[in-house]
Amino acid sequence: MFKNKKVIYLVIMLLIIILAVGCAKDEKEKPKVEKPGVEKPKEEPVKNELTVKDVYPLSQGDYWKFAGTGNEYASFEQKVLFREGDRIQLQTATGGTVMAMIYEFKDGKLMVVYSQEEFYEEENILSRENEMSEVILQEPITVGNSWESGGKKYKIEAIDTVVNTPAGQFKDCVKISVVAEEFNSKSNVYYKPGLGLVKQEYLAEDYKITAELEEYNIKTAKFSHQTTK
């Protein structure tokens, strides 16, 4: 009888040891369970989708210089003179003229709402009434998104294009094709998120005009300023 009690005692002790080791192992392998009533802090959702403002920020003071080929007026400089809310005034200077343009962010779109050639003064004209509403960029910024505006057909062809320019190589660029059937022409426009326009090319039947970023000074760009030597 005593021997049986001793055997039972040893078996019980052995089981306790085995269970203890097993529990310790489970503690290492299994994730810890939160105690009832204790809420785990929620993690911020990861932002995946780009907005038009991500792609083309257009902050006051931003500056771009483009080297052009195919036409004497293909090279140009552009800068943001004024910004009030979602209205932006840009000045574009080519070898032939200086143009004032007003862009507007609205409802997930970037629109050109005013333009005037031979405008040489740096005067704030953001209060002027809109004369047009051509959408040049529209959400969602996803491949295949398309829209028609200003007699042109726009389509996002890619969001991961690599673009080489005199200012450097830019990855993950948004490529947009623009077809103007009236003029039997096509353009490709490339934007680098956080920087804006980095390249555009105009393709016709017998010639091609290209403008590529040469210099820039952009507040929101996570790149160092570069100049072509």
Image (cartoon, rainbow, N blue to C red):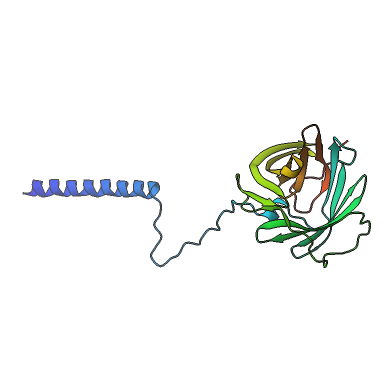
Percent across and percent down for residue 116 are 87, 57
Q: Is residue 127 above or below residue 117?
A: below
Q: Which of 123 and 188 is in front in this view?
A: 188
Q: Which of 201 and 41 is in front in this view?
A: 201
Q: Residue furthest top?
A: 206
Please indicate whether residue 54 sits to the left or right of residue 14 in the image.
right
Q: In which quarter of the image is residue 175?
A: top right
Give me the residue at 72% from left, 45% from top. Answer: 192
Give me the residue at 81% from left, 37% from top. Answer: 209
Q: Which residue lies furthest to the left in this view?
A: 1
Percent across and percent down for residue 86 are 74, 63
Please indicate whether residue 170 sits to the left or right of residue 36 in the image.
right
Percent across and percent down for residue 123 are 90, 63
Please indicate whether residue 95 sits to the left or right of residue 29 in the image.
right
Question: Total of numbered circles in the picture?
Answer: 0
Give me the residue at 87% from left, 64% from top. Answer: 124
Percent across and percent down for residue 47 are 59, 54
Q: Residue furthest front?
A: 182
Q: Nearer the viewer, residue 148 or 209?
A: 148
Image quadrant holding the C terminus, namely top right
